[in-house]
C-alpha cells in the first residue's frame, strides 16, 4: 500500500519548508529512515526521511518549491503501483518557483492603459479606450522591439497640440517620460491605438537639454552627467524561510512588548589582561583560545544566577522563572540571524564555553544545527563589537524577557582616582520586557555583570 510523504514540521516554529534538493530519484528503492530530501526550515537545512520501505514512486514537488507543513511532497509504494489517485491534484505544485527574481522592468512597467478620462485642450473630458494586448506589449518594449525616431527640436515639455493644430494623443506614461526628458511630442508619430504616442515611440529620441545644462556640459573640466542605464534599477528577491520567521517574530516583539533599555559602560582592562594570560597558557598546551565574548557569556550566566528575575519567560498568563541558565548567542549568517544556545552556561568552564560557542557558530553558519540547539534559551547576548559598533539596542527574542547588546572594547581617556588615564572600555545595553523586569531589577543585574567583568576573578569564585 502506498505511503504519503508530507512536509514535516522539522523545527518547533516551522510553518512551511522549501525543498532544497532531492536525495532520492523517482524509481529508487528507499528504506525507513533513509534521507529522501533536504528541506530548508526557518532556522536550518534539515533532512526529510522516509517513514516506510518501498520505492519512491512520485516526487510531487520539485526542488526549490516551498509548501506548508502537512502538504504532500512525495509518494512511496510498491514498484509499478498506481498512485495517481493518491497524488491527486498535488502535481500542480511540481513546478519550482523561478530561480531569478521578477524582472524589474516587468514589475515597474505598467500593462495596457485602462480607460481614463483625459481633459482635451477645450476643457472637455474624453475617454481613451484601453489598449489591446498587442499595443500594451508595444508600450513596454514588447516583441516587436523599439522603433527609433528622431525628435524635432522644440520646447522642453510635451506640446499640447500637434503640427496639424490638433491635440497630441499620448498615453500618461509617454507624457511623463517626455516631461522628464524634455521631449517635444508634436513631431512624434504614434504607433498606439488611433495613432496614440506610447512609451516605445520615445525610445531613441534625442533628449532636449535646457540651456543651463548645455552650458554646464560645454564648460571645460565639467563632464556632463550621464545616468547609468546598463542594468535593472532594482531586484525583488523572494524571502527565505529564515527571513520570513525573523520578520514574524520581530513583529511580535517590538510592537506588543513594552521594552525599556538600560546602558552602562564597563572597564575591560582586567578582562583583556586575563584573556591574554589564558590564551598564552592555551597556546602552550595547543588548546583553542578564549574570546572576550566567551568571558561575557560566562559572566552573564553567573549574574543571572544571582538575579533570576532576569532569567525568565513571559507566557501571557504566567511568568516562568528559570532555575537553569541557558544563554543564547546571536550568530549572523547569510540569510539572517540564529541564536544557538549554550545550556547550563553557569556550570561550564571558560574552556568548555569557548569550545561550544565555536562549534555552534560554525554549524549555525552551515545551517546544520538541530532544533534543540537553537531553541530554549532563557536569555540572549548579541555582540557587534567585532564590527566596530560602539553601542546599540537589541530586539528581545520572545518568550525571553531580556537581551544584552554588547559593543566594542575601545581605548578612551577616563578619570581614574582623580587622574586622567587611557582605559579599555565597553558599552552594553540591556533590553528589558517591562511586563517581567522592572527598571531597578534590570539595573541591579547590570551592576552585578559590571562587577564581574571589572573583577574577572569573580568568575571562578
Image (tube, helix red, strand yellow):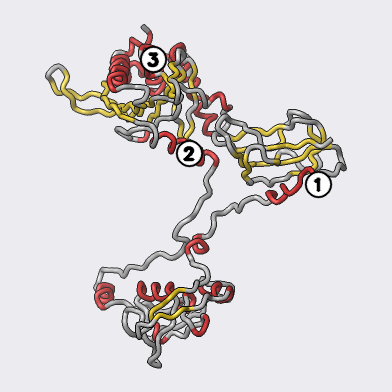
Q: Nearer the viewer, residue 341 or 207?
A: 341
Q: Position of residue 186 (x, y in %)?
A: 39, 86
Mark 1 closeness class: few <14, some 14–19, many ≥20 residues within 10 Å: few
Q: Is residue 410 visible?
A: yes
Element under label 2?
helix
Residue occupying image coordinates x 46% and y 80%: 197
- Read off the residue under disc 1: 84
Task: Please report whichever mark, 2 or 1, sits nearer to the chain's N-terminal start.
Answer: 1
Q: Indicate whether 284 appears above or below 359.
A: above
Task: Please report whichever mark, 3 or 1, sits nearer to the chain's N-terminal start.
Answer: 1
Q: Quadrant of the N terminus?
A: top right
Residue occupying image coordinates x 72% and y 36%: 36
Q: Indicate whether 319 appears above or below 241.
A: above
Element under label 3?
helix
Q: Position of residue 263 (x, y in %)?
A: 27, 27
Q: CA distance from mark 2 to mark 1?
A: 37 Å
Q: Position of residue 72 (x, y in %)?
A: 70, 41
Q: Residue furthest right?
A: 80
Task: Place residue 302 in its image quadrant.
Answer: top left
> Do callouts 3 and 1 mark residues in contact (Cβ within 8 Å)?
no
Residue occupying image coordinates x 48% and y 38%: 248
Q: Nearer the viewer, residue 357 or 435?
A: 435
Q: CA distance from mark 3 to mark 2?
A: 28 Å
> Do callouts 3 and 2 mark residues in contact (Cβ within 8 Å)?
no
- Read off the residue under disc 2: 248
- Read off the residue under disc 3: 308
Amino acid at each position: 500500500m502506498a505511503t504519503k510523504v508530507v512536509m514535516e514540521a522539522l523545527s518547533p516554529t516551522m510553518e512551511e519548508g522549501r525543498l532544497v534538493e532531492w536525495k532520492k530519484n523517482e524509481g529508487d528503492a528507499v528504506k525507513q529512515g533513509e534521507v529522501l530530501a533536504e528541506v530548508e526550515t526557518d532556522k536550518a537545512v534539515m533532512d526529510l526521511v522516509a517513514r516506510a520501505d518501498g520505492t519512491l514512486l512520485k516526487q510531487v514537488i520539485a526542488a526549490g518549491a516551498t509548501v506548508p507543513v502537512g502538504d504532500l511532497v512525495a509518494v512511496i509504494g510498491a514498484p509499478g503501483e498506481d498512485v495517481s489517485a493518491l497524488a491527486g491534484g498535488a502535481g500542480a505544485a511540481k513546478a519550482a518557483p523561478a530561480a531569478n527574481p521578477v524582472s524589474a522592468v516587468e514589475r515597474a512597467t505598467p500593462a495596457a492603459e485602462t480607460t481614463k478620462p483625459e481633459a482635451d485642450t477645450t476643457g472637455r473630458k474624453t475617454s481613451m479606450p484601453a489598449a489591446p494586448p498587442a499595443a500594451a506589449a508595444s508600450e513596454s518594449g514588447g516583441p516587436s522591439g523599439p522603433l527609433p525616431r528622431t525628435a524635432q527640436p522644440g520646447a522642453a515639455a510635451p506640446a499640447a497640440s500637434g503640427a496639424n493644430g490638433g491635440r497630441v494623443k499620448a498615453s500618461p506614461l509617454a507624457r511623463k517620460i517626455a516631461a522628464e526628458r524634455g521631449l517635444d511630442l508634436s513631431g512624434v508619430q504614434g504607433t498606439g491605438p488611433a495613432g496614440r504616442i506610447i512609451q516605445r515611440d520615445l525610445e531613441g529620441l534625442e533628449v532636449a537639454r535646457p540651456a543651463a545644462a548645455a552650458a554646464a556640459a560645454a564648460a571645460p573640466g565639467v563632464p556632463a552627467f550621464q545616468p547609468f542605464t546598463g542594468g535593472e534599477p532594482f531586484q525583488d528577491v523572494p524571502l527565505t524561510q529564515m527571513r520570513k520567521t525573523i520578520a514574524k517574530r520581530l513583529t511580535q516583539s517590538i510592537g506588543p512588548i513594552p521594552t525599556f533599555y538600560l546602558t552602562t559602560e564597563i572597564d575591560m582592562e582586567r578582562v583583556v589582561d586575563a584573556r591574554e594570560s589564558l590564551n598564552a597558557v592555551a597556546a602552550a598546551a595547543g588548546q583553542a583560545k578564549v574570546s572576550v565574548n566567551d568571558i561575557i557569556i560566562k559572566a552573564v550566566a553567573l549574574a543571572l544566577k544571582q538575579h533570576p528575575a532576569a532569567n525568565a519567560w513571559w507566557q501571557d498568563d504566567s511568568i516562568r522563572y528559570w532555575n537553569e541558565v541557558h544563554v543564547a548567542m546571536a550568530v549572523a549568517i547569510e540569510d539572517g540571524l540564529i541564536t544557538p544556545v549554550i545550556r547550563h552556561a553557569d556550570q561550564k568552564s571558560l574552556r568548555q564555553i569557548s569550545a561550544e560557542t565555536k562549534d555552534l557558530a560554525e554549524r549555525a553558519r552551515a545551517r546544520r544545527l538541530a532544533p534543540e540547539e537553537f531553541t530554549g534559551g532563557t536569555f540572549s547576548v548579541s555582540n557587534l563589537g567585532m564590527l566596530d559598533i560602539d553601542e546599540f539596542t537589541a530586539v528581545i527574542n520572545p518568550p525571553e524577557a531580556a537581551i544584552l547588546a554588547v559593543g566594542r572594547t575601545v581605548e578612551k581617556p577616563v578619570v581614574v582616582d582623580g587622574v586622567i588615564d587611557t582605559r579599555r572600555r565597553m558599552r552594553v545595553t540591556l533590553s528589558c520586557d517591562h511586563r517581567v523586569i522592572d527598571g531597578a531589577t534590570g539595573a541591579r543585574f547590570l551592576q552585578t555583570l559590571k562587577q564581574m567583568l571589572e573583577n574577572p576573578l569573580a568568575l571562578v569564585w
